């Protein structure tokens, strides 16, 4: 079974530039998550989708971050404009709607460096 | 690769010994507690979870203990192997939409 795919794996940008990350969840998984993991910390949930609807985006800095999940499959996370403090690993995870519902499968992440 | 263990509490264990990783949680309303393993350059990997109405659950070489009285969670790894070297995160889940909050990680170093 293919895992969660993310791209790019690494990205370096200057502050005030824009950046987008892509995630392809495990086939059939209805729930998709984006997390931000700052070096030395645990992942922090940014946004959670159930199919193509947003379930929780309470910790998403909406003035600069946006995310969408068109057709309930792939998802993109965008930052515009980026700040130095956005340097982190951005993790995408997915989980099935039923079954082992608390097991989230994580992708390898995208490491963002903002200079 | 990335050093996800930077500045984290570190536990060093001899290969073959048992490891115990501890975690304190804060939300009494959490209904699930989960342990994740994160190797350098990878995303977290689910290890085991436990419902809030249980106090012990066993998996393959791992046991999770939950003490709700003192809001304490522990992960025991039997016969620790070099491949167990990673950062371990406890997490708690609340509500019906699987909202997971990660705690502070612990870096496990296995000494061959």
Image (tube, rainbow, N blue to C red):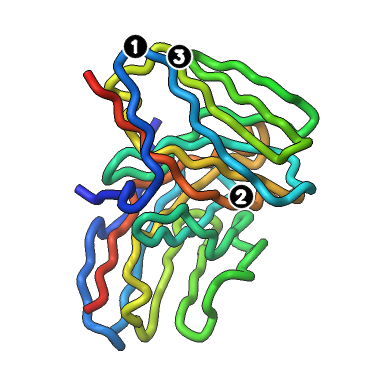
Q: Residues within 10 Å of mark 1 (few under 14, many from 20)?
A: some
Q: Which mark is residue B78?
A: 3
Q: Residues within 10 Å of mark 2 (few under 14, many from 20)?
A: many
> Is residue B30 left or right of B108 when viewed as pictured?
right
Pointer 1 and pointer 2: residues touching (CB < 8 Å)? no
> Does label 1 or label 2 sit earlier along the sequence?
1
Residue drawn at x 65%, y 38% as measured from the top left: B33
Where is B37 relative to A37, above or below? above
Q: Position of residue A4 (x, y in %)?
A: 40, 44
Q: Which mark is residue B100?
A: 2
- Secondary structure state at the residue bearing disc 3: loop
Disc 2 from disc 3: Cα separation: 26 Å
Quadrant including the C terminus of chain A: bottom left
**Do the residues marked 1 and 2 share a common chain?**
yes
Q: Quadrant of residue A76?
A: bottom left
Chain for mark 1? B
Chain for mark 3? B
> Does label 2 or label 3 sit earlier along the sequence?
3
Residue drawn at x 38%, y 60% as measured from the top left: A90
Q: Position of residue B102 (x, y in %)?
A: 55, 50
Residue that mark 1 sits on: B16
């Amino acid at each position: 079974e293919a895992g969660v795919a993310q791209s790019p794996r690494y990205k370096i940008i200057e502050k005030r530039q824009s950046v987008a990350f892509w995630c392809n969840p495990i086939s059939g998984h209805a729930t998709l998550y984006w997390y931000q993991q700052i070096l030395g910390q645990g992942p922090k949930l940014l946004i959670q989708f159930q199919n193509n609807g947003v379930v929780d985006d309470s910790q998403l800095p909406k003035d600069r971050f946006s995310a969408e999940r068109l057709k309930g499959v792939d998802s993109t996370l965008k930052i515009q404009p980026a700040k130095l403090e956005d340097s982190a690993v951005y993790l995408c995870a997915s989980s099935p709607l039923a079954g082992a519902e608390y097991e989230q499968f994580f992708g390898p992440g995208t490491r963002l460096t903002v200079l | 690769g990335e050093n996800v263990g930077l500045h984290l509490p570190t536990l060093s264990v001899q290969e073959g010994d048992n490891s115990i990783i501890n975690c304190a949680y804060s939300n009494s309303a959490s209904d699930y507690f989960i342990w994740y393993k994160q190797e350098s350059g990878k995303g977290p990997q689910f290890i085991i979870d436990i419902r809030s109405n249980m106090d012990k659950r066993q998996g393959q070489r791992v046991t999770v203990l939950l003490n709700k009285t003192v809001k304490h969670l522990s992960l025991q790894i039997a016969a620790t192997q070099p491949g167990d070297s990673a950062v371990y995160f406890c997490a708690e889940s609340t509500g019906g939409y699987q909202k997971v909050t990660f705690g502070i990680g612990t870096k496990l170093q296995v000494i061959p």
